[in-house]
Image (cartoon, grey):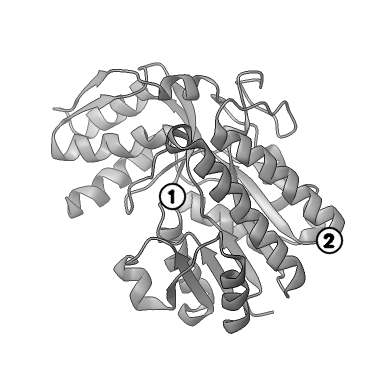
Amino acid sequence: MGRNILVIGSAGQIGSELVPALRKKYGGENVVATDIKTPFPEIIKKTGPAIYLDALNKDSITKVISKYKINTIFHMASILSATGEKKPQKAWDINLNGLLNVLEVARTSKIDRIIWPSSIAAFGPTTPRENTPNITVLQPTTMYGITKVTGELLAEYYYSKYLLDIRSIRLPGIVSSETLPGGGTTDYAVEIFYEAIKNKNYTCFLKEDTVLPMLYMPDCIKCMIDLLEANNSNLKRRVYNLAGMSFSVGEIAAAIKKQIPAFKIEYKPDFRQAIADSWPKTIDDSFARKEWGWHPEYDLESMTKDMIQMLSKRL
């Protein structure tokens, strides 16, 4: 079956790199990029359809699906953790009502598959923080985390009740060189590279010994396409833990210092420290590895070298 793909939230950190990757694999005209943030990045505007779409407008989603004969959806629109704590009602509205609109339209349309990212924010302080299992306590303390747990339950519900093939991964922090992140607790792992290259110093909003799971963007894109293409008969669940690497703020600073010896870092923790302290340090993603062959290609050293090389060219 040929894929006609709708990406909701194409201008965000992940969407802006996911769309070009999908177009390379499935064809430019077969991947419709949408967002409420316009104008779109040039690479998205030049390579295929790019249109305004509000996930809170159910009728608009229906019209786009009909017009472009969509059979696959990547629903990426979301308010992230730190921003969600400043605007909790908005986070609930966009993260959950947007998802519910997509699910409702999808179940009455000919949608073959939906990919929707959850997050390590679904975990909380009562979750085991080392080697966090796929099936565990989910008691998040942020509105972002609450919306992700609710979304996971919706995914399970729509699959069991309507046989709607929705698949989800609990993404860790994403490190990327193309687009700045948009208000997450793991944003430091992107900001630190920009500041190291431009100013040779960075003031971090987390403590030096704070360890969080991370994933480099090329691996993030790879995992989403791999999950999309996985045979449903091999999948035993709708939601998967996902891990790439785990490191402390001090460890990424040391890795950068190897490449940029003049780099210096200071630590001034703010409200995001409490959020980070409620999340896992390391993740057990053995179900993803076993059931659909997940395997990351980057570690801290190779990611650091690639990020510095990519950003140095641009900055």
User: Residue 13: where, in percent of width, then height?
Assistant: 40, 51
Which residue is drawn at the image coordinates 44% and 27% (left, top)? 247
Examine the rendering and report whether any part of residue 4 can be seen: no
Q: What element carries label 2?
A: helix
Q: In which quarter of the image is residue 188?
A: top left
Tag shown at residue 162: 2
Amino acid type, mark 2: Tyr
User: Residue 174: where, in percent of width, then height?
Assistant: 44, 42
Which residue is drawn at the image coordinates 25% and 43% (left, top)? 308
Q: Callout 1 environment at 10 Å: few (<14), some (14 to 19), or many (20+)?
A: many
Amino acid type, mark 1: Met
Examine the rendering and report whether any part of residue 220 can be seen: yes
To which residue does mark 1 refer?
A: 217
> Of residues 78 and 299, which is closer to you in this image?
78
Q: What element carries label 1?
A: helix
User: Residue 225: where, in percent of width, then height?
Assistant: 58, 60
User: Residue 266: where, in percent of width, then height?
Assistant: 23, 19
Q: Callout 2 environment at 10 Å: few (<14), some (14 to 19), or many (20+)?
A: few
The earlier-in-sequence mark between 2 and 1 is 2
- Disc 2 from disc 1: Cα separation: 32 Å
> Of residues 305 and 70, which is closer to you in this image?
70
Q: Is residue 275 left or right of residue 187?
A: right
> Of residues 96 and 31, which is closer to you in this image?
96
Numbered marks: total: 2
Q: Quadrant of residue 171?
A: top right
